[in-house]
Amino acid sequence: MHNVIQQLSGGKLPGIPELADFIRCYSPEDREELFTHARQIRERYYGHDVYIRGLIEFSNYCRNNCFYCGIRAGNPRVSRYRLTAEDILACCRNGYGLGFRTFVLQGGEDPGFPDEKLFELVQALHREFPDCAITLSVGERERAVYQAWFDAGATRYLLRHETADPDHYAMLHPAGQKWERRIRCLHDLKEIGYQVGAGFMVGSPGQTPEILAEELHFLQKLQPQMVGIGPFLPHCETPFAGEKNGSCEETLLLLAMIRLILPNVLLPATTALATADPRGRVKGLLAGANVVMPNLSPESVREKYLLYNNKVTSGSEAASAVKSLADEFAAAGFRVVTDRGDCRPLEV
Ligand code: SAH
């Protein structure tokens, strides 16, 4: 067995050079062995269950200018939309009926959707769906705002750190957007008591195997409950229009490594993975993922939350999407469950 896999399986994280070498030149046999280990650990904690999260992309307005993102402020070609609180509640009611017990409210950093309005919405959701988890993913805010949303009933927050390397962060974002602030936000969220989701894109411009190795060290140190990763996919109206796609293969490899480092982590097979490969979600589950996040946004706006080109908005309505996902997963031996899908405690 490759030394790196052996160490990871034994709960030890190899050093950066060793991890980077492995990422650079693993063999097909290494890959299979790694996936097998990752699946075993996933099964130990979560069996064959797949947790579903109802994703509601409620606004594509954003004040930021991330170089990779299609809905960046500097893209004048985006047709902007913002759902109302009533629209969002309706999405959740629909989702509840389909078996969703987690709602993920994601959007750009939209000044037109004030923090107080989101506070009231979280309160209303928490009142109407006390058995559901409310996850927010709306970027960087002051700690007091995160605290208020937590007090209103949001218990999970997704904020990808995007890269563990500050210099790399500066290649992906304009000067005003600081790595330190993003990391501070993650720590604030953790301290408040949120279940936190970090993450990064695989194959983003300027990323090296060494940086990917740093990601693993970063995650081990942060100990997030959730990790979202997917291949970088260029968007034609961004400064990264001409860059090449992140690889699906490499994403799967990283998923499996993350499963070994954080055995009980909630690990989604993301939309970007499904966009890069039509079988991406199932392949993700086979590499150790245990979560999927089907889109519950109204169909009229789905095409507009375009972070990258060709994003799959499959299953024209949520109900059919859940059914076809469940069928596809069942064929691979997995079972979609109606459950909040909280993080299992770590076995010692
Ligand atoms: N505004 C929120 C949500 C961002 S969108 C926030 O700041 O957290 C969610 C994630 O999509 C981002 O964190 C980024 O990692 C990913 N993403 C954005 N553009 C992408 C692209 N071109 N290819 C792949 N993933 C992308």
Image: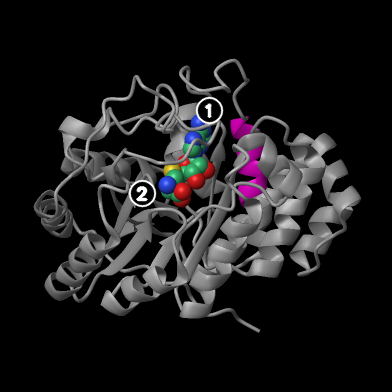
The residue shown at (62%, 30%) is 247
Q: Is residue 245 above or below residue 186?
A: above
x and y, in percent, of residue 89 in the image: 13, 57
The residue shown at (19%, 67%) is 120
Q: Secondary structure at mark 1?
A: loop
The residue shown at (29%, 31%) is 314
Q: Secondary structure at mark 2?
A: loop
Residue 147 is one of the magenta-drawn residues: no
Q: Nearer the viewer, residue 78 or 243?
A: 78
Q: Is residue 195 above or below residue 289?
A: below
Is residue 280 shown to the viewer in this render?
no
Is residue 86 shown to the viewer in this render?
yes
x and y, in percent, of residue 132 in the image: 25, 70
Q: Nearer the viewer, residue 124 or 335?
A: 124
Q: Main secondary structure of the magenta part?
A: helix
x and y, in percent, of residue 139 in the image: 44, 53
Residue that badge 2 annotates: 293
Q: Is residue 35 above or below residue 305?
A: below
Residue that badge 1 annotates: 233
Task: Please report the bounds of the magenta region as a residue range.
Answer: 247-255
Residue 50 — which label?
Answer: none
Residue 249 is one of the magenta-drawn residues: yes
Q: Is the residue marked by circle 1 packed among few (<14), some (14-19), or many (20+) residues within 10 Å?
A: many
Tag 1 or tag 2, which sits nearer the N-term?
1
Q: Amino acid at mark 1?
A: Leu
Q: Would residue 139 be found to the left or right of residue 21 on screen?
A: left
Is the CB atom of the residue marked by disc 1 within 8 angstroms of ligand 1's nearest atom?
A: yes
x and y, in percent, of residue 334 in the image: 41, 53
Q: Residue 348 falls in which quadrant of the image?
A: bottom right
